Amino acid sequence: MLKSLLLIVLALVIALGGGAGSVWLMMEEVEDFGALTIGEWSVNPTEGTPQADPYAKARFAREGKLSLGAAEGAQFVAARDTTGQPLRGACDYAVTGSIPASRFWTMHAVQPGTAETPRALQSLALLRDASGSFSIALSRHLAPGNWLQIGTEGPYRLVLAVYDTPTVGTADFAEITLPRIVRERCNG
């Protein structure tokens, strides 16, 4: 009798622990099934739509995101630099290149496990040179020109949200050109 009870309890612990562990793994560690990669950036064209996979829907709801229609825009997320190394607050980066044609865009850093409002750059306040190109410094320390302050020494993700863009709704995502994230130096 006691042996049967212990086996039942063991089976329940394995089932519940395995189930909870697999959900955590899918929600936190596995990339979206429908995500496309463009350089360092990834985008999920079905995010927030009925066509998204169940884990993407759960992630979307948990993070409290707002759904953008295909013609309204898209969110591109980067967790690594051009060399494939994870983005870390202890390092300084330069974001250079171009952004898809859009009426407005924002860029902010998201730190895992924090609820603080992220600092952001937006297209209307960006300094550009005579040719229209730009460079954005990602750093914890003050930098001249376009600077996005990073509030952590640990890992983070960079989010580029483009709004009211014809590029995303009509073109193949693989044809979009996005800025490069180049590591300049690390402090540890």
Image (cartoon, rainbow, N blue to C red):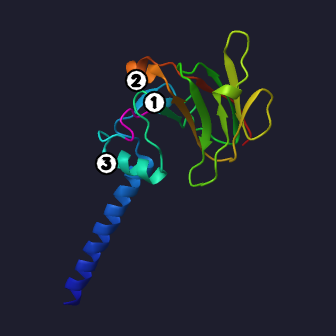
Near mark 3 (Cα within 10 A), the count class, few <14, some 14-19 or many ≥20, is few
Residue 169: image tag: 2
Q: Identify the residue at image location x=46%, y=43%.
A: 66
Residue 47, magenta (yes or no): yes
Q: Which residues are magenta?
A: 43-48
Evaluate if marks 2 and 1 touch, with contact meaning CB atoms under 8 Å apart: no
Q: Is residue 163 among what the camera can see? A: yes
The image shows residue 95, relative to residue 139, as above or below, that is: above
Q: Identify the residue at image location x=70%, y=46%.
A: 151
Question: Looking at numbered disc 1 in the image, what kind of residue is underneath it?
Answer: Glu
Question: Looking at numbered disc 3 in the image, what kind of residue is underneath it?
Answer: Pro
Identity of the residue furthest to the top in this view = 131
Q: CA distance from mark 1 to mark 3?
A: 23 Å
| Of the pair 28 and 165, the residue shown nearer to us | 165
Q: Is residue 172 among what the camera can see? A: no
The residue where tag 3 is placed is 54
Image quadrant where one finds the C terminus: top right
Residue 54, magenta (yes or no): no
Disc 1 or 3, which lies upstream in sequence?
3
Q: CA distance from mark 2 to mark 1?
A: 8 Å
Disc 3 or 2, which lies upstream in sequence?
3
Q: Identify the residue at image location x=68%, y=47%.
A: 153
Q: Identify the residue at image location x=49%, y=34%.
A: 75
Q: Secondary structure at mark 2?
A: helix
Near mark 2 (Cα within 10 A), the count class, few <14, some 14-19 or many ≥20, is some
Residue 117 placement, left or right of 36: right
> What's the magenta bit mostly, secondary-structure-wise?
loop
Image quadrant where one finds the N terminus: bottom left
- The spot of residue 187 in percent (x, y) is 74, 40
Disc 2 or 1, which lies upstream in sequence?
1
Q: Secondary structure at mark 1?
A: loop
The residue where tag 1 is placed is 72
